Image: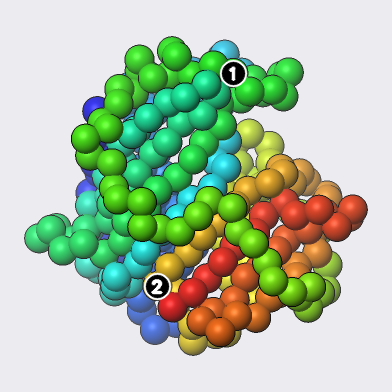
Amino acid sequence: MKYTFESRIRFSEVDDKGYLALPSLINYLMDCATFHGEEVGVGLDWIAEHKMTWVLASFRMKILRYPKFNTKIRVSTWATAFRGFLGYRDFLVETEKGELLASGKSDWVYMDMEANKPLNVKEQAEAYGIEADLALPEEFGKRKIRLRDQGEQMEPFIVHESNLDTNGHVNSGQYILLAKNYLPRSFMPGAVRAEYRKQAYLGETITPVVHTMENGCAVELRNSKGEPYFIGEFTV
């Protein structure tokens, strides 16, 4: 089934120019996916009871326009396929009049939280249903992000409680918020690719590495071993 919820851009969600901030936009997508789970009976209470959850592996999106404060929007999501332990989900963000603001594709891994291993998605496919005919065109770029230089290492920082979600690790949208701190202040990306490699937990040290590109930049958030938790590519 396709799931849609309506909202209004809040003052707490905008940047210093009054436009929806990129991390807030990503949060809308993640919230929509979470609401979808609640709607079909596999929401947060179900996750807590069964110790099974979805972990975001990657997403790719295009942003046509950032809405301003007080704009009424609707956010939609649906599952396009399930294979093995993977689920594939698309998103749309529109104005109340149907103007397309942003769209994207995402890949998720279904996990046993206690054993920390992937699970077969059959029961989840039955819950969510599959809307393969609604799948967006594959025009968002590749899932894997290839970096072309060593990048510039920035000052490390520590993971705080405010960065965590109900699964006990850094929230997907928080990685975007943390990475955005290293983008040019006035830069509003028109395309974003994000790859989630490892889960970061409370008290761990994250080292940002910034890679400058002709049409934007990429930001790695690495662990103490130099392995990326997250790679985000932000382009015009």
Task: Read off the residue under disc 1.
Answer: 119
Q: Residue at x 52, y 21 (%)?
A: 84
| Viewer-closest of 26 and 56 | 56
Compare marks 2 and 1 and give the one earlier in the sequence.
1
Q: Is residue 202 above or below residue 38?
A: below
The answer to whether residue 34 is left or right of residue 129 is: right
Please, which residue is most extreme toward the right here?
A: 225
Q: Which residue is mark 2?
A: 190
In this rendering, is residue 28 above or below 69? Answer: above
Query: Can you say whether 80 is above or below 218 in the image?
Result: above
The image shows a total of numbered marks equal to 2
Q: Which residue is at a point 58% across and 71% down the rendered structure image?
A: 180
In the figure, is residue 80 to the left or right of 117?
Answer: left
Question: Which quadrant of the rendered structure holds the N terminus?
Answer: top left
Q: Are marks 2 and 1 in contact (CB under 8 Å)?
A: no
Callout 2 amino acid: Gly
Seen at 40% across and 58% down, the residue is 140
Secondary structure type for disc 1: loop
The way the protein has been coloured in the rendering is rainbow
Q: Is residue 54 visible?
A: no
- In the rendered structure, which amino acid carries the disc numbered 1? Leu
Q: Mark yes or no: residue 193 visible.
A: yes
Which disc, if any, is residue 104? none
Left or right, 164 with reference to 93: right
The percent position of residue 93, horizontal first and vertical second, equals 27, 56
Residue nearer the viewer, 126 or 22: 126
Tell me which corner region of the image, top left, top right, bottom left or bottom right, holds residue 188: bottom left
